[in-house]
Amino acid sequence: MEEMTQVLSYASYLLPALVVGIVAYYFFKGHIANEEGRRRYLVQKEAQNKMLPARLQAYERLTLLLERIDPNKILIRVKPFSDDIDKYEELLIKNIEQEFEHNVTQQIYVTPECWDLISAAKNATIHIIRQAVMHEKGANADKLREYLLRNFMEEVTPSQKALAYIKKEVAELFV
């Protein structure tokens, strides 16, 4: 009987220690998880602050790309060397492709939606030029330029649409 009392006495001392130990274990486990999450957040925030200038520079370069391949601007900047409409079409498309290839690495800094829209603007511009060449078959390169410029003076070009999306995306960076 005395042994049973002694065992119960030890158990009465051990039980509160076990409860305190279990509570401390879960408290420290939660605290460590919270601290780890806070550290990850701070590291991510710091990385984001370091990445922001690179992203803004990418948006600037892509804006320049869109401005340079805009039909209204490329037609003024790239003049035909001869009257051959096919050679002028080739020259315009080559310029668009070169501009695009020069900026292809910028896609890693922008969202996939933004890059897809920029790529679509490039392809739409090339398509517009090819459609105009088919419409103006038999004309010379200067007539093609006039036709394209006349048609795009009033319209929103694919480049302008993509540029509006870039502006919206950049604005979201600062919200």
Image (cartoon, rainbow, N blue to C red):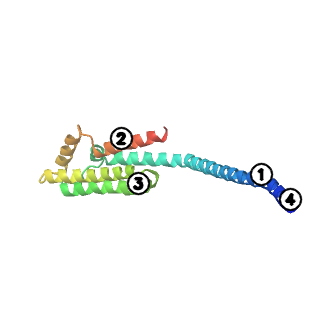
**Residue to which mark 1 is pinned:** 16
SS for dot 3: loop
Q: CA distance from mark 2 to mark 4?
A: 82 Å
* Quadrant for the N terminus in the image: bottom right
Q: Which of 5/21 is in front?
A: 5
**Residue to which mark 3 is pinned:** 103
Amino acid type, mark 4: Gln
Side of 175 where 2 appears, left or right: right
Nearer the observer: mark 2 or 1; the answer is 1
Rendering coords of residue 24 (x, y %): 73, 51
Amino acid type, mark 3: Asn
Amino acid type, mark 1: Pro
Mark 3 neighbour class, 10 Å CA radius: few under 14, some 14 to 19, many 20 or more: some
Q: CA distance from mark 3 to mark 2?
A: 18 Å
Residue 6 is tagged as 4
Q: CA distance from mark 1 to mark 4?
A: 16 Å
SS for dot 4: helix
Amino acid type, mark 2: Ala
Nearer the observer: mark 4 or 3; the answer is 4
Side of 155 where 108 appears, left or right: right
Rendering coords of residue 28 (x, y %): 70, 51
- Residue located 27% across and 43% down the image: 157
Nearer the observer: mark 1 or 4; the answer is 4
Q: Earlier in the sequence, mark 3 or mark 2?
A: 3
- Residue located 37% across and 43% down the image: 165
Residue 164 is tagged as 2
